[in-house]
Amino acid sequence: MEKYFVSNNKVLGTKVLTTIENELSKCTSFSISVAFITSGGIVTLLETLRELEQKKIPGRILTTDYLMFSDPKALNKLSQFSNIDLRMYNCQDKEGFHTKGYIFDTGSDFHILMGSSNLTQSALTKNIEWNTSLIVDQDDEYKNALFNEFTQLWNSKHTQPYSLIESDYQERYEDSKSVKRILKTFSEKNKIESLKPNLMQEAVIKCLNDSYDRGDNKGLLISATGTGKTYASAFAIKSLKPKRVLFLVHREQIAKQALKSYKRIFQDDKSYGLLSGNSKEYDSEFLFSTMQMMAKDESLSHFRKDEFDIIVIDEVHRAGAVSYQKIMNYFKPKYWFGMSASPERTDGFDIYSLFDHNILYEIRLQQALEDNLLCPFHYFGIRDLEIDGEVFDDTTGYRQFSKLVSDLRVDYIIEKANFYAYSGNRPKGLIFCSNKEEAKELSRKFNERGIPSTSLTGEDSQEIREECIERLVSDTREDYLEYIFTVDIFNEGVDIPEINQVLMLRPTQSAIIFVQQLGRGLRKSKDKEFVVIIDFIGNYKNNFLIPIALSGDRSYNKDTIRRYLQEGNRIIPGSSTIHFDEISKKRIYESIDTANFNDVRLIKDSYLQLKYKLGRIPGLMDFDVFGSIDPIRIFDNKNLGSYHMFLKKYEKEYNVSFSSTEEKFLEFISKKFASGKRPHELLAIHHLIYQGNNLFTYLKKALKEQYQIEMMEQTKINIINLLTNEFATGTGKKTYEECIFIQPDGDDYSISESFAKLLENEAFKKQVDEVIKFGLYRNNQEYSQRYENTSFQLYSKYTYEDVCRLLEWEKGEVALNIGGYKFDKNTNTYPVFINYDKDENIADTVKYEDHLVSPDKLIAISKSNRTVSSDDVQTALNSSVLGIDMELFIRKNKDDKISKEFYYMGKIIPTGTYKQFVMPNTNSTAVEIEYRLKTPIKEDLYDYIVNS
């Protein structure tokens, strides 16, 4: 019997949900008995349950009417699956029902999850839950006892198929809910509502007061959509006790909403007014104005330059516009308060400089979810429809508009909206389209099908927009709307907390806009447990932006993005979940594969946004500290190679110039060592810069004392060859022929004359030092947990060259010469490299079926034209006896032209099982060898490698 502990642990990146999803995806049948089932619990599993239905995997689910807790809406959804038999146990008198058990039959054994977790959103994702996962044999005594108990309850006279009691339970549930609602209303009716700041808002209050006390006159709040920026500004400004405040927005509707928010905080202590096309309340103490109206000379003439103590600019990323600039140039308040969820711009305007780069507080989507400031979302990335064999791509709308609005697509959209559903009694949804014509036509066809909807564009008046929103959120109007179709007018600013479903029918062109549209549903609202996001994904070239937007990761590391696509549910904070169907995953993977993240345009854009934020040329460390693009993308760009070369080409304020030799040294250090995969060379070069001699005397001591690494003779030879250009092979040797760092000096080594001469240039010395410090920082952050006696960190990524270097080989080897594995007799090491996904077009002689049987078992194939008696095969089979270290490296995608790295999976040991065979479609023999992994691959990485 195998046992595992299963909990929701954000530090370890584990959730009960992912365990259940994984078990369901592998089982041949399942049985579940839980006391409580809610819509939030079911929606997290919808995609998995849909796939099980398609595979005809049977399931039994037993729940109860205990405490009238289980949601009929959730039970109705479960009962719609043809493969699921749903039954309800009717509790007698004061009888309790507290089972929380999940049984998965895999065909060969049973996987059982027992503990505290019901099928509810919080239990599956964020509550403190303790469960035990067991793997038992078919005839296990524990399993048999559990099955007997389940069968007794399943067949009890108090248990009935849910379909037979559905209406009765619905009625009893609603009666119970009504009683609870009355009791709650009675207990709260004498309470006086008092708004209190949340954690984020409290932080903003402190930060604004600190800034004001320092004498600053500008400050910027960066806060994710839905976290309460407007209330945060009101709470913070109240603490400063201003006489007059101006609140600037770009739409009248937003001004009205902001006015209501401020009035709730300041109540009747101030007078409030609007300045817009429809209102001219100039004399109000707190004035809420549209930018368009305030920018008029007539409006400005009503106010002194110092009229307002504080001016708030909402959605301040728009402040680069001429009208905003006119207002900012006119007024001289005591404090400018800027707010935005996304101050980054693509037009080259520096919003940060408008606020003297004074960021009061910053909280992005991931942190806001972790701090429970937002409503949980359940994102479903699903394939868009194929019509006449054609998949929607970036040009479909221009070429064949009729397909975008065809009856087939409309029915498909409605089907999916109904399947993934919403929280609450009816949908209150926003649907984002590619263009106005699509929005109008789709709305017309929804109405034809009895689904009340409308479309809104920039052409509609403020009154029409407000009326439509009121119809959308109302629970009492007969002319209610279920959906509003739009293109971009709701991307930002508009506060509609009741939104419970967001449909995305357009390609993702920007991670910023994606998050803005997602954010429309993230505001919390009474009786809204979650919001459903349905993204219809076609063959769009920028599909890779979807996982980037959801993760908030801006490193642009392809494998990191791929893993988020596969494992996002484990990573995303709180109760939110992320799901992609298989076709959508494939489309996004293809987009990632073809994207060039070393593209200088991407690097330039990321660099500019960071520079704007800091108000200066960023240092290398700034990219990591502020979550910008990974500087390794700069080093790996074949036309750059170093940060210096990037700045030289693209930064006008950078006036440092180096000789070609200096540039080559910087490139060598940046490309070879700055990733920090081991500290040896970084320490060595740092010592050469500041001491110059007795290199290995120092290095031996430093590695031992600082890193607990013993420097052997082979280590020394390896480093000497690296720092004298003797390690490189192929074209690399010629490229860096000038890069000689050291020379012999008695029994030791010292700095070479050429390198010492270059260091006389202080600017060059400073930049070398910066790269070295960055590399050491990266080593500490990402590669410091060395596995056993190796220089590798388990599950970190390494290139062929890295592996040869870290195994301390005297010379490097090009990939062609390694050919999947290579034994180095000097170091007694034998790395094995596996490309898990192979190109279907490669020759049969190299199309080996290497595969993982389980997290701790590998089948690897020898090179072609080998027999059991071949030297390399014998060396592998007898590696344990010969004291040879076999290390395993696996790469998911060989076709990625940018990322050439392999995951390090630890040591492997031959089990003694092997088989010689003739390779398919050839006359070549090879040998299949079974290995045991000394450390089983962790679950999420194994799943990514094997299943995605």
Image (spheres, grey):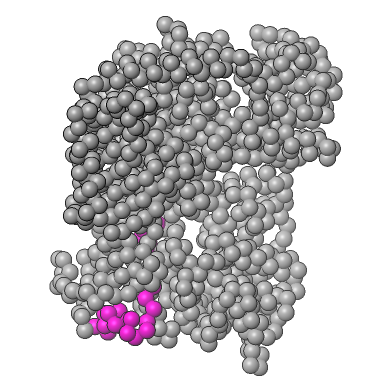
User: Would residue 882 be counted in the magenta stretch?
Assistant: yes
Tell me which segment is drawn in magenta: 870-896
Q: Is residue 31 left or right of residue 942?
A: left
Q: In this view, does 67 lie to the left or right of 148?
A: right
Residue plotted at (68% across, 8% down): 279
Q: In the rendered image of this protein, does residue 695 appear above or below residue 27? A: below
Q: Position of residue 678 (x, y in %)?
A: 55, 71
Outermost residue, top side = 478
Q: Nearer the viewer, residue 119 or 786?
A: 119
Q: In this view, does 165 lie to the left or right of 745?
A: left
Q: Is residue 889 visible?
A: no
Outermost residue, front side = 94
Q: Is residue 670 left or right of residue 799?
A: right
Residue plotted at (56% across, 51% down): 629
Q: In the rendered image of this protein, does residue 111 appear above or below residue 638? A: above
Q: How many labels does the image show?
A: 0
Determine which quarter of the picture holds residue 350: top right
Q: Position of residue 667 (x, y in %)?
A: 59, 67
Residue plotted at (29% across, 66% down): 857
Q: Position of residue 643 (x, y in %)?
A: 62, 59
Q: In the rendered image of this protein, does residue 127 appear above or below residue 870? A: above
Q: Which of 508 and 803 is in front in this view?
A: 803
